[in-house]
Amino acid sequence: MVNANPRWMSAELPLDWIFEKTPKGRDELATRAHGLLPGQRNLLILADGHRPVRELLKAGTDPQRCMQALRQLVDENYLVLTAGTAADRPAGHPADAPGPHALLIALVEEQFGAQASRLVQKIEQHPDTPEGRVAAVQACVKFIRLFIDEKQATAFAQRAQELLPR
């Protein structure tokens, strides 16, 4: 981990910087005690000590808002700068792509907004394995059918199938 740096004064974080969760960040993922917004939580999940800022900014539809959320996570001590950068890895390294669970979480947050928290819980209850992901998608589809809408359940199932590795 790297301590504070004068470059931190800028609202923009260098695109090759890599962040990892602090104990406070790990606690937030486990307990939701600090009530982060869905976009902040998604960034916190994706910040794994391997992905550079440029990859984290792809987590949402608005890179500027993602940068602001990322900056806030850093300022509030959920994330800390790691010593390495993306330049330390070969191009196309698997760490540059979001994991399947993170992709599912981003999908439910994008598609269901304020209603996503219950679906995120369903995803997080299952292991990040092929079988666990199938079970997580099935649990989400069932919930969406029961509490939201049949058409949205079908659309979610289709998008999840396209999104996840086979």
Image: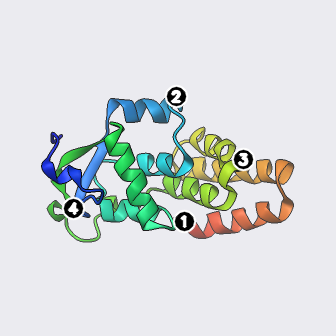
Answer with mark 3 or mark 1, whichever residue precedes in sequence.
3
Res. 86 mark: 4
In three-dimensional space, the C-alpha distance between marks 3 and 2, rounded to whole angstroms, equals 24 Å
Q: Is residue 65 visible?
A: yes
Q: Amino acid at mark 4?
A: Ala
Q: Amino acid at mark 2?
A: Ala
Answer with mark 3 or mark 2, whichever residue precedes in sequence.
2
Q: Is residue 46 visible?
A: no
Q: Residues within 10 Å of mark 2 (few under 14, many from 20)?
A: few
Answer with mark 4 or mark 2, whichever residue precedes in sequence.
2
* Disc nearest the viewer among 4 and 3: 4
Residue 20 in the image, given as x and y percentages of width and height: 30, 44
Q: Residues within 10 Å of mark 1 (few under 14, many from 20)?
A: few
| Residue for point 82% across, 53% down | 148
In three-dimensional space, the C-alpha distance between marks 4 and 2, rounded to whole angstroms, equals 31 Å
Answer with mark 2 or mark 1, whichever residue precedes in sequence.
2
Q: Which residue is mark 3?
A: 139
